[in-house]
Image: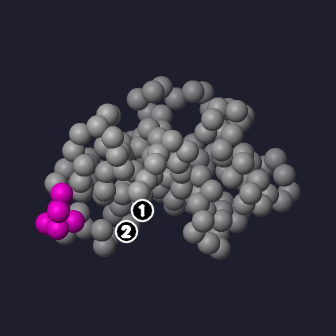
Amino acid sequence: MRMGWWKLDEQKNPVYLGEGLEAVKQASMDDTEARRVGLDLIGNFRVSTVFLALDHNFSDQGPPILFETMVFPEKNNSDLACERYSTWEQAMKGHRQMVAAVHHCLATSQTVDAEQLESFLAARQTNDGPPLESSPDSKDSPTNSASDVQEEE
């Protein structure tokens, strides 16, 4: 598996750049909007999906993990949920599913705080929560969730 930096081509396909300083320069992290798959404000929560540019698959197994959907309380950056994907198409589908999950949770109560939403989304990720749509086929399902990805910071 190739660890390292990636960029998106004009069709939103990931292109491997390599490792090191030259690859970082080519990754062009400055243009946030070009890397954004989706951003939705739902009540007091934000759902954000972006291209990461750095492969977050830290194993020798499987495809690169290059996209991430996260849910945040509106006023801070403490994430409540995280799912990761390999392709732009998977990231778009995952973003729509996360938006639907947040809407579903907010529809169940007049007031939902960050802790309640985090619990709801965690149950959804472990399949203990209510289904939001028919089960996605494995090709389009999220590759990793925050609970099963170990990152070194």
User: Magenta segment, principal secondary structure?
Assistant: helix
**Which sits in the foreground, 48 or 120?**
120
The percent position of residue 87, horizontal first and vertical second, equals 35, 43
Residue carrying label 2 = 32
Judge whether residue 91 is colored magenta.
Answer: no
Quadrant for the C terminus, please: bottom left
From this view, report whether residue 74 is shown above or below residue 80: below
Disc 1, SS: loop
Residue 92, disc: none
**View extreme (front): residue:** 152
Please tell me how many numbered marks the rendered image carries: 2
Q: Which residues are magenta?
A: 19-24
In percent of the image, x 23 and y 39: which residue is there? 1
The earlier-in-sequence mark between 1 and 2 is 2
32 horizontally vs 48: left or right: left
Residue type (three-letter) at the residue carrying disc 1: Glu
**Which sits in the foreground, 136 or 148?**
148
**View extreme (right): residue:** 110
User: Label 1 neighbourhood size at 10 Å, few (<14), some (14-19), many (20+)?
Assistant: few
Residue carrying label 1 = 153
In percent of the image, x 25 and y 49: which residue is there? 3
User: Label 2 neighbourhood size at 10 Å, few (<14), some (14-19), many (20+)?
Assistant: few
Q: Is residue 89 visible from the viewing direction of this image?
A: yes
75 horizontally vs 70: left or right: right
Mark 1 vs mark 2: give the one in front. 1
In percent of the image, x 66 and y 46: which residue is there? 121
Residue type (three-letter) at the residue carrying disc 2: Thr
3 horizontally vs 122: left or right: left
The answer to the question of whether label 1 and label 2 lie on touching residues, with beta carbons closer than 8 A, is: no
Q: CA distance from mark 1 to mark 2?
A: 21 Å
The percent position of residue 34, horizontal first and vertical second, equals 33, 63
